[in-house]
Amino acid sequence: MPKFTSFDFAVEDAVGRITLNNPAKRNALGAAFWPEIREVFGQLGEMPEVRAVVIASEGPHFTAGIDLALLGIILDADSEIEGARRRERLRRTVLNLQESFNVLEGAHVPVLAAVQGGCIGGGVDMITACDMRYCTQDAFFVIKEIAVGMTADLGTLQRLPQIIPEGLARELAYTGRSLTAQEAGECGLVNAVLPDHKALLEHVMGIAKSIAGHSPLAVAGTKEMLNYRRDHSLADSLNYMATWQAGMFLSDDLREAAQAAQAKREPVFDGLKLSTGLFE
């Protein structure tokens, strides 16, 4: 099992669980987090036993967002380099940080976020890249960047308006006000609001385990189609669906599901091992 310093990772009943583990710093996302989150999602292709992922955290808050110490390092880096070259390196740094959340969206398995307390700044970037979000009744969400003189740059402004009404997304982005758990449930940012952290984790893990019981090939295809539909026209999406189905429809999973239904038993599906190791 891979070991990480910025979060714990474990597999339970085919569900990979990532737990931010630095509550003393409100689970701020420090320098180690960004390459480690890319690494764990990169390794999912070698872990066919993992069929869904839950991102959670320890302590009273989900995350305070990007560690301010890391921001200082980024701002001070390469201060002696010529201005245009320094700005190009900064652009590439932002793209690199964005990729740490793009991997959640691009994963072949669904990713579920379990939020308690504060989800601030980079935390909103992270959860908007997840497939589904759930929270406790004391949770709140803040696009904090506007309050510190910067534009949110890791995905919130691009993804949040596709999840909640655009007017509300703009209000939150322009004002930096807190969105309460009740509002988050009403606007569709979260699927459910649970009374406390224990109930939240039980609920989210239950949904993840339900997903894990289905054909991993069908689940991966469903996520692929939903993401493609979001970014393309209806006609293009239907055409892509037909092409995908031509390649994936006649699978062992379809046969196993039919046989299990006929025998009145639970189906058993092979996992997906997507990494070939040829170019790694």
Image (cartoon, rainbow, N blue to C red):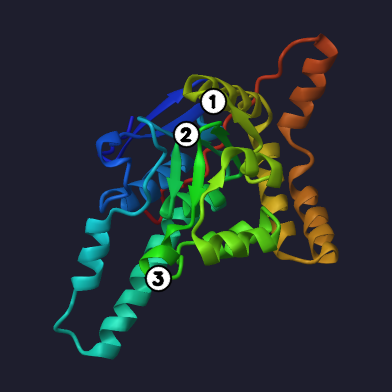
Percent across and percent down for residue 260 are: 77, 16
Give residue 194's position: percent from left, percent from top. Answer: 59, 26
Please state if 200 lies on the left or on the right of 63 as rendered.
right
Q: How dense is the environment of label 2, judged by Cα within 10 Å: few (below 14), some, or many (20 and up)?
A: many
Up the image or down, 103 lies above or below 40; here it is below
Q: Earlier in the sequence, mark 3 or mark 2?
A: 2
Measured Cα–Cα span from mark 3 to mark 2:
25 Å
Of 169 and 154, the residue lying toward us = 169
Q: Quadrant of residue 150?
A: bottom left
Q: Is residue 103 visible?
A: no
Q: Amino acid at mark 3?
A: Met
Q: Residues within 10 Å of mark 1 (few under 14, many from 20)?
A: many
- The numbered mark at residue 200 is 1
Label 3 sits on residue: 150
The amino acid beneath tag 2 is Gln
Q: Which residue is mark 2?
A: 116
Dot 1 and dot 3 residues touching (CB under 8 Å): no
Q: Residue at x 75, y 52 (%)?
A: 244
